[in-house]
Amino acid sequence: MTIEHLHTYLVYPNKGIDPPRPIGGTDVPLEGEVFDLLQDVYAKSERECAIDIAFDRADDGTARNDCRTLLLAYARAPSVDTGLSLATRLGSFSTRRSALGLLFLATGMIGQQRKIVIARFAAHSGILADENREALSVQFVERVFLKSVGSYKAVLYQDTVNDQGYWTGKAVDKQINSGEAEVSRYWITEWDCQEFRVWRGIMGNKETQYVTTQRTLDTERHSRSAACRH
C-alpha cells in the first residue's frame, strides 16, 4: 500500500477573485520527510475517512459530474498536469475563510484498482514572500507543510479505472474535529459536488440508512441548536 505518485499544489482562495491567482504544482519525490508523512496519511485513510460521500449526478439525471470527470482523468494518467485541474477547481471554491492551502494528490495501485487520496493542509500566508511564482519547489513545500502536518481534510477514492468508476468515496475533516454533519461545505458539497451518505450500522448488521443532502444535515444541526436553547 505504497504511494506510487505524489503531487502537490499551492491553492489560493480564488472564489470571487478576478482574475484568479495562478496555482502552481510539483512532483514530490517518493522519499524524505514530506513523503513519509503523506505515506502515513495514505496508509491510514481507510480508517480515518469514515464519512461516506457520493458524486451528484447531472440535473437531468444523467451519469455526469464535472469534478468526477477531472478525478477520472487523474486516475487514468496521474501527473502534475492532470491534477492541476482538481487543484484549480478547489481554488475556485475556496474563500478567504478557508485561506491558503497545500493540496496533495497521492495514488497507487491495489490489485486492479487505483487508490487516490486527496488531502488539503493549511498554509500560513506569511510564507508567500518566499514563493517562486514560476515554480513550486519541494523545499518550499517542506517549509509550509511541516508547520501544519496534524491538521488536514482528506477524501479517499478506490475503484477500477473505467467509465463506471469513482462515483463514491470517503471523507474526513481533521481541521474542525468534526462529526459526519460538520465536514466543511466547500470541501465536499461545492468543490466536489457530492452528497453526504452517512452510514449507520443497525444492530450490528450492514443494513444502511442514508442522509443524502447537505440541506438535511443543516436542518438537523439547526434543530439540535434550537433544542439546546430551550
Image (cartoon, helix red, strand yellow):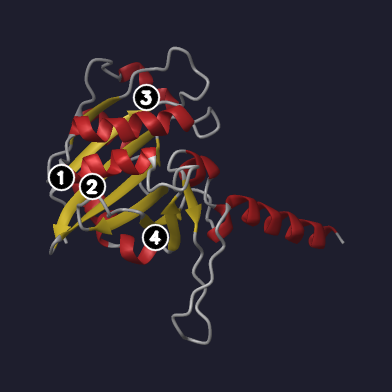
Q: CA distance from mark 2 to mark 4?
A: 15 Å
Res 49 label: 4
- Whether residues under marks 1 and 4 lie with C-beta atoms below 8 angstroms apart, the answer is no
Residue 106 shows which numbered tag?
2
Label 1 vs label 3, nearer the camera? 1
Disc 2 and disc 4 in contact, CB within 8 angstroms: no
Image location of residue 52, percent across then percent down: 44, 61
The quarter in which the C terminus is drawn is bottom right
- Where residue 188 appears, as percent x and y from the top left, is 47, 46
**Which label is found at residue 5?**
1
Q: Residues within 10 Å of mark 2 (few under 14, many from 20)?
A: many
Label 1 to label 2, Cα distance in Å?
6 Å
* Residue at horizontal 32 percent and vertical 46 percent from the top: 118
Q: CA distance from mark 3 to mark 2?
A: 24 Å
Instruction: State the residue position of label 3.
Output: 127
Camera-side mark, 3 or 2: 2
Q: Where is residue 87 drawn, in percent x and y?
A: 33, 33
Q: How many marks?
A: 4
Label 1 close to label 2 by CB (< 8 Å): yes
Element class at badge 1 = strand
Secondary structure type for disc 4:
loop
Q: Amino acid at mark 4?
A: Cys
Which numbered disc flags the more N-terminal residue, 1 or 3? 1
Q: Earlier in the sequence, mark 2 or mark 4?
A: 4
